[in-house]
Image (tube, rainbow, N blue to C red):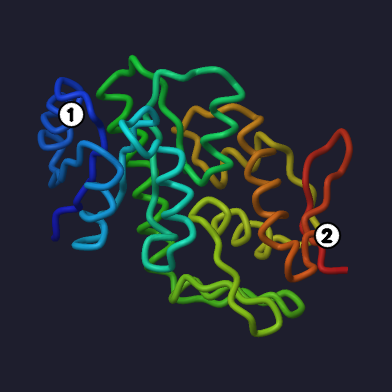
Amino acid sequence: MSVETILIVEDEAAIRDMLNFTLSSAGYQVIEAHNAEQAWQSLNDNVPACMLLDWMLPGVSGVSLVERIRKHERFASMPVIMLTARGEENDQVQGFEAGADDYVVKPFSPRALVARLKALLRRENSDAHVSETLVQGDLKLDLASYRFTVAGKEVKLGPTEFRLMQFFMSRPNRVFTRLQLLDHVWGEQVVVEDRTVDVHIRRLRKILEPVQRAEVIQTVRGAGYRFSID
């Protein structure tokens, strides 16, 4: 069984050392970067299983880095956990909208962080081993190749948006509450706020706007969200 690699992008040496020790003890291989430039070079050398990314980096911020990552085909599906002392709701929304899959506020429990990392990787790995294609109208989601197309044109989705679309397309015309979406898409072990769902729904609609399919994700007032191709 291969050892999964985690890239830590953090400018504070003490936090890097703590994360390195924690993740190494949990059985992961660790790569470190002190800033966004080093992280980008490391990504070009080897794409890790996940990246732990500090927001307040010298020079290019963590938010700018994750935005750049999501625009690059090679790294677009790589999970990113944002680590930051910025715990305000608006900051969390900005982190998720930039493309982070999870958001952990400092100070944090190392054990809890490892649990969240394992839950995120478990979902990614389970998706990667499913050889199935979902088709709704001219929308096609290929789980084996991790590709999403609309009318034959490929549309890039981040990891969370991909799981959301997979969940919706496999259950069309049903209304799901935010809590149900959190449990099925993020997992019951991961503690995130209901607003997280709204942020990623907005991201998914924004991605679908250029191909005129944003309306397939419908808001049902007082109930939740529904996927409908009609």
Disc 1 residue type (three-letter): Arg
Query: Relative to 63, is 42 above or below?
Result: below
In the displayed orientation, state which residue is furthest to the top.
107
For disc 1, the neighbor class at 10 Å (few under 14, some 14 to 19, many from 20) is some
Residue occupying image coordinates x 68% and y 76%: 150
Residue marked by disc 1: 16
In the displayed orientation, state which residue is furthest to the bottom.
152
Query: Relative to 20, is 181 above or below?
Result: below
Query: Relative to 21, is 32 above or below?
Result: below
Quadrant position of the N terminus in the picture: bottom left
Report the disc number at residue 93.
none
Q: Nearer the viewer, residue 115 or 11?
A: 11
The image quarter in which residue 94 lies: top right
Residue marked by disc 2: 215
For disc 2, the neighbor class at 10 Å (few under 14, some 14 to 19, many from 20) is some
> In the rendered structure, which disc, 2 or 1, sits on the residue that comes first in sequence?
1
How many numbered callouts? 2
Residue occupying image coordinates x 13% and y 42%: 27
Residue 162 spot, x, y in % from top left: 55, 59
Residue occupying image coordinates x 49% and y 27%: 191
Could you say whether the residue bearing mark 2 is in a helix, strand or loop? Answer: helix
The image quarter in which residue 17 lies: top left
What whole-number distance in Å separates the C-alpha atoms at marks 2 and 1? 43 Å
Residue 36 located left or right of residue 184: left
Quadrant position of the C terminus in the picture: bottom right
Query: Relative to 2, is 31 above or below?
Result: above
Disc 2 residue type (three-letter): Glu
Residue 112 located left or right of residue 150: left
